[in-house]
Image (cartoon, rainbow, N blue to C red):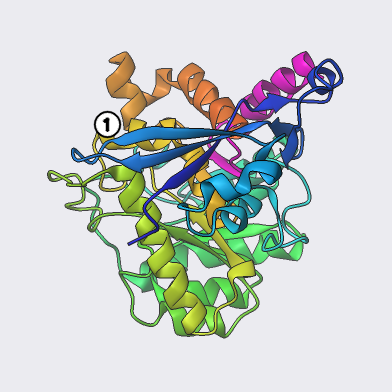
Amino acid sequence: MTDEYFLEPENIKIGRKYLKKNLNKKYIKLSEGLYFSHIDIFKKDKNNSLTNVANLDMQFFEKKVSSFKNFENIKERIKKIYSKSHFPKKLFFKNPLIMGVLNLTKDSFYDGGRYFEEKSALSKAYALIEEGADIIDIGAESTRPGAHAIKSEEEIKRILPIASKLSKENILLSCDTRNSETMQAALDVGVKIINDVSGLSYDSNTLNILKSYDCFYVLTHSQGKPSVMQNNPQYNNSVCDVYDFFNERLKFLSSQGFPLSKIIIDPGIGFGKNDIHNFNILKHLGIFLDIGLPILIGLSRKSLIGRFINDTPKNSLSCSLVLAVDAYMKGVNLIRVHDVKETINAINIIKHANY
């Protein structure tokens, strides 16, 4: 279990224009272009709901730190919110990074089958880069709810020709896989990031492969395998349970000698979670910041949007963009999307409007 409280930055502002008008307040840099002045402290009540028990004004926190002695390690945890000591400098050269999705599948929920052939896949990858993607995330096995596993041999057969060609052109690549054999094959041809939806729960050899390469690892929370993960998922509180999952897994990874500076966390929206769970996590994304690691979020065209607007993924672009901007404003560092150009434009215009 975690400490019995949770921290979340509050009063987050974009750009310096606002700060110059409020010199009487202390704003702390959260990430590139984002600043916060307060922190909410939450505890779980008897119903496992998060209850706000205090609000810290960062301008006076150092003077009043003794009054928060009941909150163990609060100074260290607050520092983790804005300190980027564990962030890999070579990777996080701007904020947020945009990860473009390249699905080499026939059954993905949004674009399955469109880029199954090598020629169309390469064309899509180049288009994503042209639109401004910082990373291309290549996946050959659908992990949508209800999807069934494919053999690693088939997965490798789909991924390798694309990854080999793109890596030779110095394009930063991520491989979306839970199979250690696929991870190894992808890393051998120059992939730099392993995006594992299983959170180390699927393939027992995953950690051995990760430790053998100089790569980054996306630790994703999910509950159950894709084929059954939406069959009545259960949580005491989805935010707190996912937070505990990260702390437990990170302690394990650290004990096994895998450096924290190589880890990115992803709360796994839609992976073994119903809409109540998902929106609770989205509301409190900032709570994961005091883990002290980069946060990735994948919201693009997801089914929770379709259920909310009662429409198909094809017509969910506007809501995908709103959620991407909202995630950025809550401190998320890496956003995984299908619509790269539109997402970048949405984030840039809200930055411009506040600078």
Instruction: Tell me which residue sits at (55%, 51%) in the image.
Output: 290
Closer to us: 238 or 272: 238
Q: Which residues are magenta?
A: 330-355
Q: Which quadrant is home to the C terminus?
A: top right
The local crowd at label 1, few if under 14, some if 14 to 19, many if 20 or more residues have their Cα within 10 Å, is some
Closer to us: 49 or 341: 49
Report the number of discs: 1
**Residue 161 coordinates in the image, percent (x, y):** 57, 64
In reply to whether residue 343 is colored magenta, the answer given is yes
Regarding residue 181, the answer to whether it shows in the image is no
In the depicted structure, whether residue 24 falls above or below residue 150: above
Closer to us: 347 or 2: 2
Q: Which quadrant is home to the N terminus?
A: bottom left
Q: Is residue 59 left or right of residue 300?
A: right
In the rendered image, which residue does mark 1 sit on?
275
In the depicted structure, whether residue 275 falls above or below residue 221: above
Per the image, label 1 sits on a secondary structure element best described as helix
Closer to us: 2 or 106: 2
Q: Quadrant of residue 270?
A: top left
Regarding residue 104, the answer to whether it shows in the image is yes
Q: Amino acid at mark 1?
A: Asp
In reply to whether residue 312 is colored magenta, the answer given is no
Instruction: Tell me which residue sits at (65%, 50%) in the image.
Output: 135
Q: Quadrant of residue 333?
A: top right
